[in-house]
């Protein structure tokens, strides 16, 4: 049976890890694209060498040319600079803005029917830019932020409570940055809200560690940012799209009135399937969380304005 086709633009840490995960899970045949000559080809070949060991039949090919990406079902964009210690994701705005513009223009021309998933930071601004530059319906342009932030929240909840990670269903919404909004009241530990499981001061500490989870990794690595959890997170979104599961995942989507917000991309629970985003059902937020979400939206809108994005 023919597998779907997924293009991953950017064959760096996040892109290559994503390609390998998708191949080993037999989710798709993967085309890895990068501006750096030889890098996508070499990494793709290396992954193919693992085929008999990992026993997957997916193909991974590397290219510097978007012709190889034609008619992809999904395009994942990881091209761009990662953070260095001391940098915020917003420090990447101008440099990654021009990279995402050029990548999206070429990838959307080659695959006009694809679902696009942006990973490049600052995520919410880059996803909005990708939507504008592509000219595609917003349901087919989304970003990976909330899945990763929620996964980090889940990990820190597991550490603090001692509960198995599989019993935790955590939720972080808002911008993928310091303005993110972990939601303890909607984060469940074996079916009970975190706020009933941990004292308030411990919840505050888990939230703090979640917000700086990415920065903690950057501080250790010094030369780049996280890639294993980001790759796993975007792969789970691509799986929901390709298998048309209807899974509700916290995804960076265009808000059109939900939570009183519009014309901004932010992570909120969204229904994912073959057409991309098929619904954005509102979850019940407390007044503080709603206020934090709106502040998060204001921060993203400010960065979008700084980038002077035109349709
Ligand atoms: N087209 C295609 N690839 C590009 C382009 C471009 N215009 N510009 C840069 N790249 C490639 C680089 O050559 C490099 O191989 O993007 C890749 C980025 O890889 P890394 O430097 O390893 O960065 P990574 O850790 O993968 O992060 C990529 O994802 O999580 C975000 O903040 C992170 O914005 C960053 C992005």
Image: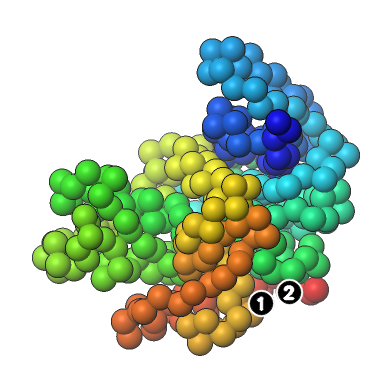
Helix, strand or loop under label 1 = helix
Residue beneath label 1, please? 305
Residue 169: x and y, percent?
32, 56
Assess whether mark 2 and mark 1 are in contact (beta carbons under 8 angstroms): yes
**Image quarter hosting the N terminus:** top right
Residue at x 17%, y 51% (from the top left corner): 160
Q: Is residue 260 above or below residue 183?
A: below
Q: In this view, does 20 lie above or below 153?
A: above
Ligand 1 located in image quadrant: top right
Residue 111: x and y, percent?
82, 50
Left or right: 17 as drawn, with respect to 6: left
48 and 226: which is toward the camera? 48
Count neighbours of disc 2 (C-alpha within 10 A) and say few if under 14, some if 14 to 19, many if 20 or more.
few
* The disc label shown at residue 197, or none: none
Q: Could you tell me if residue 30 is visible in this image?
A: no
Left or right: 20 as drawn, with respect to 104: left
Residue at x 66%, y 19% (from the top left corner): 48
Q: Could you tell me if residue 206 is visible in this image?
A: yes
Residue beneath label 2, please? 308
247 and 37: which is toward the camera? 247
Residue at x 11%, y 65% (from the top left corner): 199
Helix, strand or loop under label 2 = loop
Q: Is residue 277 above or below residue 78?
A: below
């Amino acid at each position: 049976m023919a597998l779907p086709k997924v293009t991953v633009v950017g064959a760096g840490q996040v892109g290559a890890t994503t390609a390998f995960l998708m191949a080993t899970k037999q989710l798709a045949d993967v085309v890895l694209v990068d501006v750096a000559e030889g890098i996508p080809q070499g990494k793709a070949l290396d992954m193919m060498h693992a085929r008999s060991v990992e026993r997957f039949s997916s193909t991974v090919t590397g290219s510097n040319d978007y012709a190889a990406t034609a008619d992809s079902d999904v395009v994942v964009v990881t091209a761009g600079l990662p953070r260095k210690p001391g940098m915020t994701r917003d420090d990447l705005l101008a440099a990654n803005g021009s990279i995402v513009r050029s990548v999206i223009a070429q990838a959307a021309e080659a695959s006009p029917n694809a679902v696009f998933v942006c990973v490049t930071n600052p995520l919410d601004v880059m996803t909005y830019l990708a939507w504008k530059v592509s000219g595609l319906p917003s349901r087919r342009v989304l970003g990976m932020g909330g899945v990763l932030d929620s996964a980090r929240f889940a990990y820190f909840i597991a550490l603090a409570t001692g509960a198995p990670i599989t019993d935790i269903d955590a939720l972080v919404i808002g911008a993928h940055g310091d303005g993110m909004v972990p939601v303890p009241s909607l984060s469940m530990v074996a079916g009970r809200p975190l706020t009933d499981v941990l004292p308030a001061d411990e919840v505050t500490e888990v939230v703090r560690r979640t917000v700086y989870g990415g920065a903690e990794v950057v501080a250790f690595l010094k030369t780049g940012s996280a890639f294993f959890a980001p790759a796993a997170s975007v792969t789970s979104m691509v799986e929901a799209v390709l298998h048309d599961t209807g899974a509700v995942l916290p995804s960076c989507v265009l808000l059109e009135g939900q939570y009183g917000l519009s014309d901004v991309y932010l992570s909120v629970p969204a229904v994912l399937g073959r057409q991309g985003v098929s619904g954005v059902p509102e979850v019940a937020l407390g007044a503080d969380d709603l206020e934090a979400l709106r502040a998060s939206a204001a921060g993203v809108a400010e960065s979008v304005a700084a980038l002077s994005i035109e349709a």
